[in-house]
Amino acid sequence: MKLLITGTSGFVGQFLQKTLAGQAHHAVTLSRGTTEDLLKAESYPGVYQQVDTLIHLAGRAHVMHETAEDIYQAYAAVNIDYTLKVAELARRLKIKRFVFLSSVKVNGEASSQPFTEADTPAPLDAYGQTKLEAETALKAFCAANDMELVIIRPPLIYGPGVKANFRQLIKLCLLPLPLPFAAVHNKRSFISLDNLADFIVLCSWHPKAAGQTFLISDGEDLSTATLIKTIRQASKKHSLLIPLPAGLLTVLFKLIGKSSLALRLMGSLQVDITKAKTLLGWQPKISFHEGIVRTLKE
């Protein structure tokens, strides 16, 4: 199978390339500059012809220190506008299937019960909103151009090279200090690079994936306390957890201007992966513990 992949310089893209290197797939990369050039071209080099599936990973994700004046437009320019340019190129190249990496943030930021694909989307920030708008635009485009669309909405992705909040949490866990999360009993879903890459490849060819949206995770929902214990056990350190009420911790985080961090550490966000398992027969390739061990080995 011949695959055309965007976003190969990113966190997921680099790992997917390594995964495909050991499989019977021929992967061709596509950068933004190349996309623009190909859209202007009247004919295409052979390397971009006879592609079966386009995997669109490129996007503007969470920015730790936002500097854009118009935050929504900064996300929209990449997550919507560029995505549709890639879709137009796929149409011109007569590519049969378009796999789009979206986000659980399309569903929302927190859940009282696991999200499913049937839930009404409720994005709360520019990232989630532009991912939803991209999904909607792609559905219309692919339907009009006889192209199969597969949408994947992962929760927080971790693995070797992970950055942002998960990296900060790992650094915190590696300090020989007690952490006050023993009484936090939330539930959150995560997905390792290994499991996500495996699922993306499956969606690139599986006949039953066509036209579907999938929520995907490691299949294990953990509390913040269990997450910290797992990281510390994998790094051969003592748990060192003490109990402070979750409500008190939330107030403390708000007082120091970290309300969004409080939501991630104390709130719940779960996804139901039943559809991926029953429709495609998929099972997570590795456990959360193994994913953490591989993350710490980087």
Image: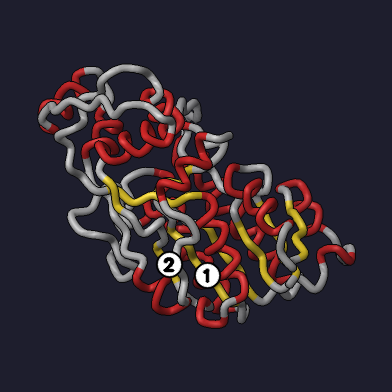
Mark 1 in CB contact with mark 2 (< 8 angstroms): yes
| Quadrant of the snapshot with the N terminus | bottom right
Q: Residue at x 69, y 51 (%)?
A: 18
Please determine whether, in this image, residue 127 is positioned above or below residue 196: above
x then y, percent, for residue 241:
22, 27
- The one nearer the camera, 22 or 253, is 22
Residue depicted at 20% across the width and 44% down the height: 186
Percent across and percent down for residue 73 are 49, 42
Along the horizontal axis of the image, is 69 left or right of 245?
Answer: right
- Residue at the spot of label 2: 214
Whole-percent x and y of residue 248?
Answer: 11, 26
Residue visible at 71% across and 64% down? 23
Q: Which mark is residue 150?
A: 1
* Position of residue 117 in the picture relative to residue 171 (left or right): left
Cα distance, mark 1 to mark 2? 8 Å
Which residue is more in the foreground, 75 or 222?
A: 222
Asked whether, in this view, residue 196 is left or right of residue 220, the answer is right
Residue at 67% across, 48% down: 8
> Circle 1: is it few (<14), some (14-19), or many (20+) Cα within 10 Å?
many
Amino acid type assigned to the residue bearing label 1 in the image: Val
